[in-house]
């Protein structure tokens, strides 16, 4: 392989950093990835507890074709490294009165499911598929482009996409074009949680997210989604990349307004031609970069920006298996009041929505024989709320377990807990480097998207690039993989190289 000549440091072995690193290593760059933890993945890393394995964050893969493309551009096939299971139905939605809805990618079955649960509403499904398919077709090319300068807005692809991008409607309001029933709209709006936003505030452009699920399906990966990051790290090393686990970075080495390398916690300084930051964006700006170099991204300015919600997490290893859906979402009785508590009033709701992953129903490798892993996620306010989680955590844990016992098939969960791990918003911030505990990064309102989101070629420092949910195109595994691809392409262009075309 012809060496590209550039020495690249990647700070953080999360999904964005690894996708960028494997692409660059496959094109001959001398790439070193520094990861402060002992395993790769960041919020996509595994949690091991008492013989049980849990995914820390993401629990299913959508838009699998993007991951396949990243592997192909690196000269590999994802199926050679990972075992995928497509989930049908995708998940189960449960309302407070026990009514259930089972979304599926089978269009005929989906129409029948709507007719069963919401008679008379099934006619809107075809309009939803047609309009949102067109929106995705128009916007996908835009989201795959770099927005490091304002000229991106005059590209023909962007101009053509404007009618599909800028809408005065929220996600919830936009779904009114297809469905009248409030509950049915909610069945297509809870995906706003992937962005950490309220569906009543989330821009209508994101109506394409539920469409993407229905068109391309969702997948489980054997061993958990953390196996994707492990596979990426393997490909990276196969191409000669150097992975340094347990190497926390103290700060970037700067020469004026240019990044020249990294300084390790032990004081050692290592020089590179380019530096890619995969750490949580706002955390990196307040910890890895000298304040005088930040410009518009000073800590004071960062705190003025809008951020996603946070999440309260329980990871439970049970000495029993339960036969119910791999993914289940349980909606609060007053769903909007719960959402407003999270995003507006910044308080804990008495009645809250929650998500459960029962992955052992699909994957026996995650728990000892006859046992199971249960992952519980509750959307809660980020740390601008002022909630004292040292005081609230245990009581809220008990409320969550009460809700699980009352609303799910796991009526006796407390009797069967063998292993347990908990993450609060305070833990996300202090232990995982997530600014304000906002697990989905900067909010995705229109004034914090595209050019108005931190740029993949970081605008404040030369030779410095960003990947991850805090930069363009945004949060969620597929878009984070895209951020890695966009950044890799920017570096390839700088060195007058074209992107690899795959095996």
Image: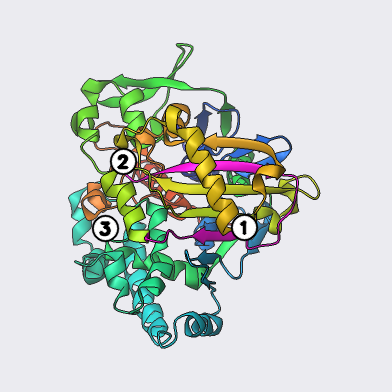
Q: Residue beneath label 2, please?
A: 457
Q: How crowded is mark 1: few (under 14 residues within 10 Å), some or many (20 or more)?
A: many
Can you tell which of label 1 and label 3 is closer to the viewer? Answer: 3
Q: Which of 164 and 142 lies nearest the eye of the viewer?
A: 164
139 drawn magenta: no
Magenta residues (range): 307-334
319 drawn magenta: yes
Q: Quadrant of residue 407?
A: bottom right
The image shows residue 495 at horizontal and vertical percentages of: 38, 41
Q: Quadrant of residue 307?
A: top left
Q: Residue beneath label 3, please?
A: 201
Task: Provide the secondary structure element on which disc 1 rests.
Answer: strand
- Horizontally, residue 279 falls left or right of residue 32, namely left
- Horizontally, residue 142 falls left or right of residue 409, namely left
The image shows residue 179 at horizontal and vertical percentages of: 35, 79
Task: Provide the secondary structure element on which disc 3 rests.
Answer: loop
Residue at coordinates 68% horizontally, 37% vertically from top-left? 419
- Horizontally, residue 479 falls left or right of residue 235, namely left
Q: Residue beneath label 1, please?
A: 220
Can you tell which of label 1 and label 2 is closer to the viewer? Answer: 1
Residue at coordinates 49% horizontally, 67% vertically from top-left? 97
């Amino acid at each position: 392989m012809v060496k590209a000549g550039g020495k690249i440091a990647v700070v953080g072995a999360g999904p964005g950093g690894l996708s960028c690193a494997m692409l660059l290593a496959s094109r001959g760059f001398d790439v070193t990835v520094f990861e402060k933890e002992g395993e790769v993945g960041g919020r996509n890393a595994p949690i091991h507890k008492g013989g049980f394995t849990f995914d820390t964050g993401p629990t299913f893969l959508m838009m699998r074709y993007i991951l396949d493309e990243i592997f192909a551009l690196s000269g590999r096939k994802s199926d050679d490294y990972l075992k995928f299971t497509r989930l049908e139905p995708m998940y189960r939605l449960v309302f407070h009165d026990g009514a259930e809805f089972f979304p599926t990618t089978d269009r005929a079955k989906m129409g029948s499911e709507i007719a069963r649960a919401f008679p008379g509403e099934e006619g809107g499904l075809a309009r939803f598929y047609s309009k949102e398919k067109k929106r995705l077709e128009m916007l996908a090319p835009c989201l795959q482009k770099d927005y490091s300068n304002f000229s991106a807005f005059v590209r023909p692809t962007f101009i053509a996409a404007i009618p599909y991008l800028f809408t005065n409607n929220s996600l919830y309001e936009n779904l009114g074009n297809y469905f009248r029933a409030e509950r049915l709209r909610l069945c297509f709006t809870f995906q706003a949680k992937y962005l950490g936003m309220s569906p009543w505030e989330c821009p209508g452009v994101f109506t394409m997210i539920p469409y993407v699920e229905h068109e391309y399906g969702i997948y489980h990966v054997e061993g958990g989604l953390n196996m994707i990051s492990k596979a990426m790290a393997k490909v990276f090393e196969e191409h000669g990349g150097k992975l340094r686990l347990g190497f926390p970075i103290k700060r970037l080495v700067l020469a004026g307004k240019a990044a020249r390398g990294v300084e390790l916690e032990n004081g050692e300084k290592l020089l590179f031609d380019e530096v890619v930051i995969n750490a949580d964006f706002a955390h990196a700006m307040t910890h890895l970069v000298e304040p005088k170099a930040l410009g518009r991204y000073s800590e004071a300015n960062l705190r003025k920006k809008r951020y996603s919600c946070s999440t309260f997490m329980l990871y439970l290893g049970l000495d029993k298996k339960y036969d119910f859906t791999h993914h289940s979402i349980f909606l609060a009785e007053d769903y909007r009041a719960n959402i407003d508590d999270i995003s507006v009033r910044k308080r804990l709701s008495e009645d809250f929505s929650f998500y459960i992953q029962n992955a052992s129903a699909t994957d026996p490798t995650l728990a000892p024989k006859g046992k199971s892993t249960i992952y519980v996620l509750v959307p809660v306010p980020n740390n601008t709320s002022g909630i004292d989680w040292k005081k609230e955590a245990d009581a809220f844990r008990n409320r969550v377990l009460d809700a699980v016992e009352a609303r799910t098939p796991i009526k006796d969960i407390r009797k069967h807990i063998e292993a347990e791990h908990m993450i609060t918003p305070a833990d996300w911030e202090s232990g995982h480097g997530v600014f304000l505990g906002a697990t989905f990064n900067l909010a995705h309102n229109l004034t914090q998207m595209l050019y108005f989101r931190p740029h993949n070629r970081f605008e404040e420092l030369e030779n410095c690039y960003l990947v991850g949910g805090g930069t363009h195109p945004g949060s969620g595994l597929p878009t984070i993989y895209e951020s890695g691809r966009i950044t890799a392409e920017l570096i390839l262009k700088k060195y007058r190289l074209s992107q690899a075309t795959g095996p």
